[in-house]
Image (cartoon, rainbow, N blue to C red):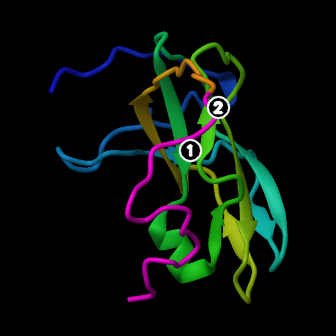
Amino acid sequence: MTPVAVEVERLDHARDLPLPAYATPQAAGMDLLAAVDAPVHLAPGARALIPTGLRIALPEGYEAQVRPRSGLALRHGVTVLNSPGTIDADYRGEIGVILANFGETACTIDRGMRIAQLVVAPVSHVRWVATETLDETPRGQGGFGSTGFR
């Protein structure tokens, strides 16, 4: 697999933090770290925008998806609120992660804590073709559990 070159700028408040990296050779996502100056306490039901101190320049035809970390979700009930968050190729602002605490106890976000995953993926643009009817399939219009619950 040939890696995609992505320019990254580390902002002043993240100079001491490592860049995102893959934890294993076949990992799809890289961990994003909290570039907070002081601990952020997320009470149950609360949400906060956590800075990462990173700006990126994705190549045209790519996006970056900000996804939750399963460990935070399982242990603390903390997830990425607008999951997956999409970073477009033309965005040049700081990557921020909106975390929400759906757990029963408060969770503290400390500096350098792994808060989300970043997945870079190709994007397809579509050309809509207006039609009066669509082809039929065995599934048809069935959705929302129509194929069963097991």
Left-right relation of 42 to 78: right
Left-right relation of 145 to 102: left
Name the amino acid type tagged 2.
Gly
- The residue drawn where x is 53% and y is 81% is 75
Count up the numbered dots: 2
- Where's residue 131, x and y in %? 61, 29
Closer to us: 100 or 32: 100
Query: What quarter of the picture does the C terminus occupy?
Result: bottom left
The answer to whether residue 91 is above or below residue 146 is: above
Closer to us: 112 or 96: 96
Residue marked by disc 1: 66
Closer to us: 135 or 120: 135
- Where's residue 138, x and y in %? 38, 64
Disc ID at residue 53:
2
For the stretch drawn in magenta, the main secondary structure is: loop
- Whether residue 56 is visible, yes or no, is no
